[in-house]
Amino acid sequence: MNLQLLWLIPILPFAGFLVNGTLGRKLPRALVATIALLFTAAPAFLVAQLWIFMKSAGAPLSLSTPPTFPWIAVSGFQVNFAFTVDHLTLVMLGVITGVGFLIHIYSVSYMAHEEGYWRFFAYLNLFMFFMLVLVLASNFLLLFVGWEGVGLASYLLIGFYFTKDSAANAGKKAFIVNRIGDFGFLLAMFLLVAHYGTLDFNTIFASIAASPLTGGLFTAIALLLVLGATGKSAQIPLYIWLPDAMEGPTPVSALIHAATMVTAGIYMIARCHVLFDHSPTALTVVACIGAATALFAATIGLVQHDIKRVLAYSTVSQLGYMFLACGVGDYSAGIFHLMTHAFFKGLLFLAAGSVIHALSGEQDMRNMGGLRKRIPITFWTMSAGVFAISGIFPFAGFYSKDEILYDTFNSPNHLHILLWFVALLTAGLTSFYMFRLWFKTFFGGSRFEEHGPTHDYDLHSAHLAAVHASKTSTLVLEAEPEPSHVPHIHSVHESPWIMTLPLVLLAILSLIGGWVGIPEALGGHNEFDHFLAPVFNAGLDIAANPAHFFMERVDAAISLLVALTGAFIAWYFYCYKPGTAAALAAKYRRLYSLLDHKYWVDEIYGRFIITPILVISRLILNGLIDGGIIQGTASGLAASTRGGGWLVRRIQSGNIRSYAGWLAAGAAVVIAIVLFGHHGIPH
């Protein structure tokens, strides 16, 4: 295979970003969508070719692009701008390009009536470019470029509705919180450079693997990388940005907060498994953070009413599962769950968008109900996602969760029993709140008013009276305040085929996507683990061991029983005896209030971290102003800025030929610098 084609995989989405970003405002929407789809379909096709080549007999375990020039070369320190593909990269590429392309298709219709249509697809392509750079990178610095790039793209996409204060604030929150984690990532890179003199993956990991030492430096670097991962993958204590990020368009939630960006931290830990294997302390920290996050987020998800926020806290919880898998040393199980999660959580977000689309923008589940027969394709496909994430056999989530639970129970970690129990409890809670969403959305009577040409407004008053008269109405479940109105829906309708097609494909993957990882104990061959074995050769032994088959079957039966129990309780609370939930919430009002207010974490951060920082910053700033330092500096800056502005005005003439000339001159300067840096600087 021509290795130069590797460069095309990220470059093509970037080309789509450039075309739509510069010309999209003047192009018809159909052409904007065509450009965006074309430049994401082509990388998916190239990745499919890579899969075929890497699976063929005699294929190498990894492919690398020949470095065309040193990206950085200073005093013997060199970083190449090069890409590498191994089996781990291949899985990530398949998820990013495959699920990403389906989400692009869905967005063509979902965003059809939005302002800034061209801007949305430009940002979406830009995100794809940076995510592909992140997973293809052959060194930490290039990975960090992709890491920061997806942060920038997510900020633009979360704040897409920038005229809406909540969306703008959510974008800023995501950007700032992730910078905290990125600080840890930077410090880890500084330590790597100081001790190894390089940032190349292969060189560093070979040195670490050859070292008989554990802990110490390895622990310091690993914990700093974990800090970066907690920001990007929304783990305690930096998870707070992800629920607010639901302010972005629903396709953004599906792409960024289900299938791709939030899994970057998991990928980074798996990529650095050699480093983490040399630090049992860091692995224990990862496992504890994952288990705590999984349980913590699941409890909050129990009482959410916004359909997207339920899925947001579910995402945080499932990312905790992936962290737990990596923390007990089974990186393959973490990546397996990452893949299946991309299928069913991407499906759930897109199906939620279809529900919102059908209900004219309504997101509150208290104002839904009775949609099972009104939007049947959405119902059946979302059902597949609910069953998969709940761990119901034989859907994909059953196999990936079962592997995490079994390997946690059998891990050498001294906390393995506690971690297993927390993971099992989280599985039950997940099943409960996901079936709660399912029942409240699709079953029971309609809790909205649909009106069209034949609408009778007297029905609205009658419906309101019935709601207030009923003590067991689903509107008063869990003792929450009743909605102030029954929403008016113009006409409930199924989504167009261009939205339902991705749902159907993702539903199929949510069913069969886990079959590649069926363990030997359940009659499979664990093909997924064997596929990743060349990457994680220091991980858990994946060879068939009949002595463990019985225990693995018992563990699978227990996890399935717990999932079915959660589903049964949700049915009992929300279908059979809906007043039960309200009674329990009233009886344990303080506990309900604690969950409803999300443990007051945002308020605690605001009072004890953000407010003191703002106060200190203002005191320092006022002191500098009173001391005259800033005024004098500002005057000098103002004068230089005026001079610079005059020069820039000369350059910005509005003449396209002039711009082309400046562009050519700039390109020539860059090429000269590169050539000089490569040939003229002594090494």
Image (cartoon, rainbow, N blue to C red):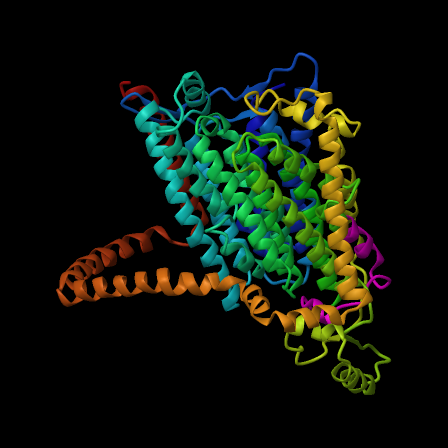
Relative depth, front residue between 504 and 584: 584
Q: Residue 413 at x, y = what percent?
A: 53, 33
Q: Horizontally, is 82 left or right of 263 in the view?
A: left
Image quadrant of residue 364? bottom right
In magenta stretch: residue 365:
yes
Image quadrant of residue 677? top left
Q: Horizontally, is 61 left or right of 464 in the view?
A: left
In magenta stretch: residue 441:
no
- Seen at 66% across and 26% down, the residue is 529
Query: In the rendered view, would you say 586 is above or below 156?
Result: below
Image quadrant of residue 53? top right
Relative depth, front residue between 380 and 247: 380
Q: Quadrant of the N terminus?
A: top right
- Seen at 76% across and 83% down, the residue is 464
Does residue 402 appear in the picture of this structure? yes
Looking at this rendering, what residue extends furthest in the top direction?
A: 58
Q: Residue 196 at x, y = what percent?
A: 34, 23
Does residue 664 appear in the picture of this structure? no
Q: Residue 675 at x, y = what percent?
A: 35, 24
Query: In the rendered view, would you say 329 is above or below 242?
Result: above
Relative depth, front residue between 349 and 534: 534
Query: In the rendered view, would you say 344 is above or below 490?
Result: above
Q: Quadrant of the C terminus?
A: top left
Q: Which residues are magenta?
A: 361-384
Q: Horizontally, is 21 left or right of 91 in the view?
A: left
- The count of marks equals 0
Looking at this rendering, what residue extends furthest in the left direction?
A: 627
Q: Residue 505 at x, y = what percent?
A: 77, 43
- Seen at 66% across and 43% down, the residue is 341
